[in-house]
Amino acid sequence: MKNMSVLSAAIFGLMMSAPIAFADDITISVVGPMTGQLATIGDQFKQGAQAAAAAINAAGGVNGSQIKLDIEDDQCDPKQAVSVANRIVANSVKFIDGHACSGSSIPASAVYAEAGALMMSPASSNPVLTDAAAKSGWSTIMRLYTRDDAQGAFIGPWIAKKYAGKNVVILHDKSAYGQGVADAVKATMNTGGLKEVYYDAINPGEKDYSALVTKLKDLKADVVYFGGYHPEAGLILRQSAEQNFKFQLIMPDSIASPEFWQVAGPAGEGTMFVFPSDPQAKPEAKAAVEKIKAGGFVPEGFTLFSYAVVQAFAEGIKRAGSDDPAKVAEALKNGTAISTVVGDVTFDEKGDLKNASYDINQWHDGKYAPIAQ
């Protein structure tokens, strides 16, 4: 009996010294490129989710439960994304704020769907993500962001009208995201009456794009639309400037990051990109933006979309009266708007946002802002 008492006391001591995990905590895995070339995006995901969780928990949580975050790094690599997804579901996490790159989100979504977890991406725009999920009958794959075809329908006709008669080149980086958005822009620009003079893919990760710059010069390119990311875009612009060649670069949402200017420098002056209407300017975001900035972080890019994903999960759980992912997804798609920092949002049956709106932003002296269209 004495030995049993000693053992019980030892176990009790270990229990008291270990962190207590309440069964009713709601764990959300935040998944993105936390390291690597696109780590800025991962940091935006993390900062947004942390700010949202802190605000919700301070207000009493979700039906009395606290939100806990699990931060995961996929480096925007498809194989690593699947590995991370398998680890998440093995840990019985039901809600995923991620992934970032479409090339990661699409393969990871199959893992989450099979496990019945609810994935909501705050950045992936390739239509295949939700189209394939709908075709497979997966109800728990969603995105709180816009689609490439919607972005293409917005900017393609604008390019066709504004640059009628000009030499337009379309490039992409072979990724699901980059090629997807470039093809969407190409299709709608062509329908708008403007045919590109050249369409091709680059090899991402290279350091020397001088041969491409020479090709652009030979084509007398006036405009280049590039579906890709800031490391390559910045290098192409810098190396073009070194050859005294200037063109109008237009990009998708991937360069909504100060790292674009860090790579491009003054060569990035005038670069345009499409992004959902500035969430930082919305009245609903005012308190969150001030709070995040007070912590030393500027909520650019995807920060507030990641924040909104956490808000959507919380609202869905409240509506469903349950943390069952299928019931939460159904509650989020019931047609009633959800109040978030990016405004009121509603989802269609596929889990896509309805009625997205866009800005055309332009970089000037290291900062970007919307321009008149």
Image (cartoon, grey):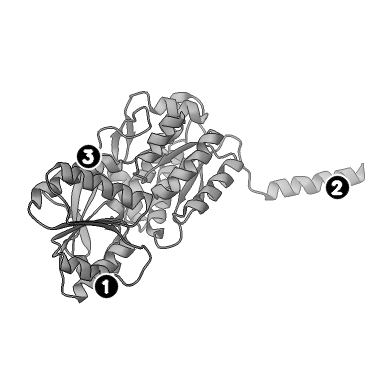
Q: Residue furthest left?
A: 165
Position of residue 242 in the picture relative to residue 6 (left or right): left
Q: What residue type is labelled 2?
A: Val
Q: Residue at coordinates 9% horizontally, 47% vertically from top-left? A: 161
> Is residue 188 shown above or below 204?
above
Task: Report the residue at 38% width, 35% height from top.
Answer: 131
What distance separates the C-alpha of mark 2 from that of mark 1?
74 Å
To which residue does mark 1 refer? 210
Disc 1 element:
helix
Q: Which amino acid does label 3 sit on?
A: Ser
Q: Which of marks 2 and 1 is nearer the N terminus?
A: 2
Is residue 246 placed above or below 58 in the rendered structure? below
> Viewer-proximal residue, 64 or 370?
370
State the image coordinates of residue 140 (x, y, percent, origin top left). Answer: 46, 32
- Quarter that holds the N terminus: top right
Q: How far apart are marks 2 and 3 (CA)?
A: 66 Å
- Give the residue displayed 17% in from the left and 68% down from the top: 217
Distance Cα–Cα, label 1 vs label 3? 36 Å
Residue assigned mark 2: 6
Reading the chain from its start, which is encountered first: label 1 or label 3? 1
Q: Which residue, given by chain and number where applicable, does mark 3 sit on? A: 357
Number of other residues with Cα within 10 Å of mark 3, as a class: few under 14, some 14 to 19, many 20 or more: few
**Eyeballing the image, is 268 above or below 164?**
below
Q: Which mark's residue is nearer the viewer, 1 or 3?
A: 1
The x, y position of residue 96, in whole percent, is 48, 41
